[in-house]
Image (cartoon, helix red, strand yellow):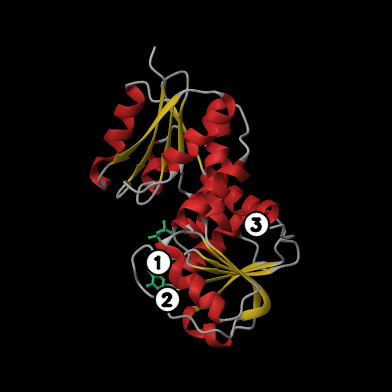
Amino acid sequence: MSAAQFAVFGHPIAHSLSPQIHQAFARQFGIALEYRTIDAAPAEFAAAARRFFAEGGRGANVTLPHKAAAFALADERSEAAMRAGTANVLTPLPDGRNAAHNTDGAGLVRDLTERHRMDLRGHDALLLGAGGAARGVAWSLLDAGVRTLTIVNRTPETADALADAIGEPARAHTRYWEDLDDIGSFDLIINATSAGVLGKPLDLPFGFVGNRATCYDLSYGKAAANFIAWARAANALHAFDGLGMLVETAADAFELWHGKRPDTDPVHDELRRQYG
Ligand code: ATR
């Protein structure tokens, strides 16, 4: 019998670290699996995902630009996926239907609290962006105890829609992107925009970076470089990219599929050594 089949769908996807991460987790338990990348253009994603499961695929990770489509095609959805309206994990159910999960928010919070040893309670957080990535983490930050979540998006209506969906106006509210210069200071600043992925500069002022601020980009590698450089120039106490979050979100998917919790630190540390 051939090894169980897993895959990550994206577009582009060739440079995904997910195959390496899942193989490293599998080695911790002596599990044999195949994990490949599947590049699907947006119009082809749903058919490609259905084909993968029809052919016996045991689980799929889903990344840009397919997270909303993955949510839409699922038959069952976890609470985190429902809140975000997006999914990064698809799992086949025994009856042939499939279930969507979103592990992004849990992965971010675990990276911050366990790897970086932050206590989020009492932090005033600024969330830059209000698209799929921002929706994936907003509720988790609030659940983890941030005192306030200020959402700032280039298009204010999208930020308002996210704040409305959260429905806790005393804790989660919006401000205008144009007011970033004069918005007060924050001790946790999360970049959830896709500017870095798109290769566009964000051109942020420095004034809202508190003197003990942690700045965190949900992306990693080249996509996070501009924001990390900005955070260091702003004298942030910490500037982190999302590599740790990626490994944590993968661990949640791995546990969903295999019922075992991998040790993420050695895998994270090895990736950090390889990719900086
Ligand atoms: P993702 O799934 O990566 O979140 P998305 O849902 O398309 O992708 O959301 C992209 C987010 O990045 C949005 O908040 C977008 O702002 P708009 O709603 O105004 O489009 C934000 N974004 C992308 N490029 C940006 C840029 N150059 N400057 C500021 N915000 C940007």
Residue 19: % across, % down: 42, 38
Q: Rounded to the nearest whole Å, what is the CA distance between mark 1 and mark 2?
A: 8 Å
Using a 10 Å C-alpha cutoff, classify the residue at mark 2 as few (fewer than 14 neighbours), some (14 to 19) or many (20 or more): some
Residue that appears at 24% across and 40% down: 44
Residue 190: % across, % down: 56, 66
Q: What residue type is labelled 3?
A: Leu
Residue 274 visible in the snapshot:
yes
Residue that appears at 56% across and 55% down: 137
Q: Nearer the viewer, residue 68 or 211?
A: 211
Residue 80 visible in the snapshot:
no
Left or right of 82, for residue 51: left
Q: What residue type is labelled 2?
A: Leu
Left or right of 126, for residue 18: left
Of pointers 1 and 2, the one earlier in the residue sequence: 1
Q: In which quarter of the image is the N terminus?
A: top left
Q: Mark 3 points at which residue?
A: 112
| Label 1: element kind | loop
Q: Mark 2 points at which residue?
A: 202
| Quarter where residue 34 is shown | top left
Q: Mark 1 points at which residue?
A: 196
Mark 1 and mark 2 residues within 8 Å of each other at the beta carbon: yes
| Label 3: element kind | helix
| Label 2: element kind | loop
Specify the farthest residue to the bottom: 182
Q: Which of 160 and 244 is in front in this view?
A: 244
Q: What residue type is labelled 1?
A: Gly
Q: Nearer the viewer, residue 228 or 55?
A: 228
Name above or below for residue 186 compared with residue 275. Answer: below
Left or right of 122, for residue 125: left
Q: Rounded to the nearest whole Å, what is the CA distance between mark 3 and mark 1?
A: 21 Å
